[in-house]
């Protein structure tokens, strides 16, 4: 980053790509999502001495299609991801032990998701991606 960043917290937050670093600066990200990720970043750094790594924010319709194109349910009736409306952020999980993953999930899910019918944090894989944290608001 070039020093003009408003939201970056050096050492505690890292970005997989320049695109993601740039997207993190977007005012389209809801404050609650930003706060949830920052909470996780401070927790990760405080207890595990590891920065939180953001691996995905915004997703285009084409990228959504590419992820799910081999899923018959998606082809039958495509759904929209929270990533397409700036309401989800993916985080790297392979840097954590299973116990650290469990603790981070507890921290993220201490924050309720809207009406409570879904979870704020999901630990999953989609398409050809590896396991990661999906944080949504
Ligand atoms: Zn996700």
Image: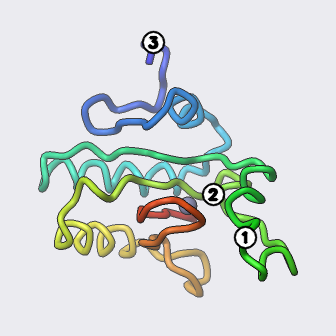
Q: Closer to the N terminus: mark 1 or mark 3?
A: 3
**Vertical comparison of 111 with 96: above or below:** below
How far apart are labels 2 and 1 at the CA level? 24 Å
Give x and y (percent) for residue 106. 30, 75
**Vertical comparison of 90 with 126: above or below:** above
Going 29% across and 57% down the picture, which residue do you hit? 94
Q: Are marks 1 and 3 in contact (CB under 8 Å)?
A: no
Which is nearer the eye, 107 or 126?
Answer: 126
Give x and y (percent) for residue 127. 60, 65
Indicate if the residue with disc 2 has its beta carbon within 8 Å of ligand 1.
no
Give the total number of marks visible in the rendering. Answer: 3
10 Å crowding of disc 1: few (<14), some (14-19), many (20+)? few
Q: Which mark is drawn over residue 70?
A: 1
Residue placed under numbered mark 3 in the picture: 2
Ligand 1 quarter of the rendering? bottom right
Helix, strand or loop at mark 1: loop
């Amino acid at each position: 980053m070039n020093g003009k960043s408003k939201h970056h917290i050096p050492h505690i937050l890292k970005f997989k790509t320049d695109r993601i670093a740039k997207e993190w600066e977007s005012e389209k990200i809801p404050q609650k999502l930003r706060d949830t990720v920052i909470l996780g970043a401070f927790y990760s750094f405080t207890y595990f001495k590891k920065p939180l790594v953001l691996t995905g924010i915004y997703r285009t319709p084409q990228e959504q299609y590419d992820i799910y194109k081999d899923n018959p349910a998606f082809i039958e009736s495509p759904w929209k991801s929270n990533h397409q409306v700036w309401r989800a952020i993916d985080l790297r999980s392979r840097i954590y032990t299973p116990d650290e993953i469990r603790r981070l999930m507890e921290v993220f899910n201490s924050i309720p998701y809207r009406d409570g019918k879904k979870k704020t944090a999901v630990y999953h894989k989609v398409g050809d991606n590896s396991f990661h944290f999906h944080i949504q608001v």
